[in-house]
Image (spheres, rainbow, N blue to C red):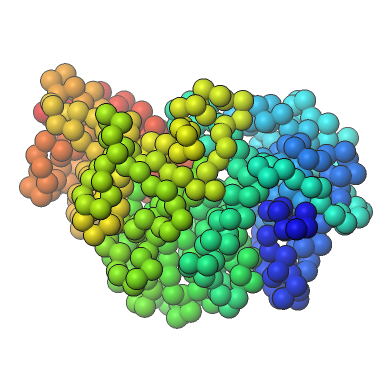
Amino acid sequence: MSNRSTNLGYFFARSVERFPDKVAVIDLYGGVERLVTYAQLDERADRIAGLLAGLGIGTGDRVGMIVGNRVEFLEIFFGAMRAGAIPVAINTRLARDTLKFILEDAECRAVFVEPATHPDAIAVASAAPLEHRIALEAAPAGWLDYTAARDGSPRLAEPPALAPDAQAFQPYTSGSTGLPKGAIMTHHGMLWYVDYNQRYWPTEPEHRGLIALPLFHKNAMRGTVKPMLYAGGSFVLMPAYEPRSFLEALAHYRCTYSRGVAAVFTMFLQHRERLAQLDLSALRELTIGSAVVTHELMDEVERTIPGVKVGESYGLTEGGSPFRKPLDGRTTPRGSPGVHAPEYGVRLVDTEGRDQPLDRAGEGELWLKSPYNCLGYHKRPDVTRDKLVDGWLRTGDVFRVDAEGFFYFKSRVDDMFSCGGENIYPKEVEDLLFRHPGVANAVVAPVPHAVKGYVPAALVVLKRGSDANANAIRDYCLENGPKYAHPRFVEVIAEADMPLNGAGKIDRNLARTRLTALAAAHTVAS
């Protein structure tokens, strides 16, 4: 077995052999279309590996990346792994102090920076204890210029040998319960997953994806980049999400597939007049994931774009996607990401630590086991002990399974709250809000209440043209759902004011903080 076959940096080598001159990536960075073939992408990754090797960066060394959506991200990410290094792709929307924390926590020896992607990136990288700094443009004094350094470096002839459990890359979690944590993801686990995915749910060479979400997020990398490159397909890479541009790219490039978080879909549904003008006949499938999804949203997308199948996905950075559409052809019901996927270990564990049966209705915290699982968390043995138990990854997500074997996300373990003795999951209230004909988007969080302890409150975005108000929405919930779970406080906000994190998902911590402050200024009903 060659060193290349065990290195994730070469996972698309077979596609390079089969389709060297085929366009792999259509990069729209800077408003200029750049077509990159498989051979070109392979060569550039090799030269990045050669550059790092020439700088003395090799096996086990971490390399920071503060880079946006452009093909250079892929060159660096996979090129670093070819050299045996561990890329650390950092969320470009993080605060300055968090950028600094990650670079230092990961103990990066080098960093690649796109100055335009973060106002403090250059300053933070300049102050960090790094040996090498490479800028993608406008390199400061003492920094290497990316293009010149890449093109002036030899292609790495042969990657170093790697241990069976060698680390491939180090993504940092969102840090919803504190500072971000670096997950240790292995070459073996990631190679297993791309091959596994292709064996059961194959991508074809003629498929074309569209990516508008950040490459540092698993939704883009695991959901589109890896399957497309592994199979010899192609994808369009947008620098950022903008609803009209997203729709126009789907049509212009004849994309067959795209995926995103719920906000992507709720936002483009506000542009129906443009949708009606576009030819989306090549589009076959859209996947919504990485956050709570309502079946009303999925139904509305399918009604708006006839012939397109909309599915829901569930996955996590450290454990992959354990639920998929059934291989026996059964239709996945709305609200479910699917059934127990083959080759995955799945458990539902109740609050007493007891396993719930998976062959009939049950509910509990999801535990996972597969080669995909992270090995632990960088310099966080306490978190590793808590999250990884005898090879099982505790996800912190509560699921229920029905008698047909379909799984349904309920909540985070720590999201459920008690309202006057009744347990409430925010998602259940959000599902009710989405059934209101005037609601385009919503997030629910608990706010303090003098009598009930906590009560639900909601931030709501209205559909264009809707004249609904907070009172009407609250009354709708009272009439159509359990009275104890209706939102006692509703704030109607503009679409642009919905609190989102760097990955485009709703930031529940920020939503809760905002709702608590708003509700405190009003008399909240009981």
Q: Quadrant of the C terminus?
A: top left
Which residue appears at 75% of the width and 63% of the height?
41
Residue 113 percent across, percent down from the top left: 73, 42
In the foreground, 102 or 374: 374
Question: Residue at image x 52%, y 37%?
Answer: 173
Residue 135, position in %: x, y?
79, 43
Q: Residue at x 52, y 29 (%)?
A: 384
Q: Quadrant of residue 166?
A: top right
Q: Is residue 44 above or below residue 448?
A: below
Q: Is residue 493 above or below residue 192?
A: above
Where residue 380 appears, as percent x and y from the top left, is 57, 25
Tag count: 0
Image quadrant in which you'd find residue 24: bottom right
**Looking at the image, residue 130 lies above or below residue 287:** above
Q: Quadrant of the rendered structure where residue 500 is?
A: top left
Residue at 41 percent across and 57 percent down: it is: 341
Q: Is residue 392 left or right of residue 420?
A: right
Picture layout, residue 21 above or below residue 225: below
Q: Nearer the viewer, residue 474 or 377?
A: 377
Query: x and y percent of residue 18 in the render?
Result: 72, 76
Between 197 and 525, the one lying in front of the other is 197
Question: Is 20 left, or right, of 54 in this rendering?
Answer: left
Decide if residue 382 is in sight here: yes
- Residue 87 appearing in the image: no
Between 268 and 330, the one lying in front of the other is: 330
Rendered-image quadrant of the N terminus: bottom right
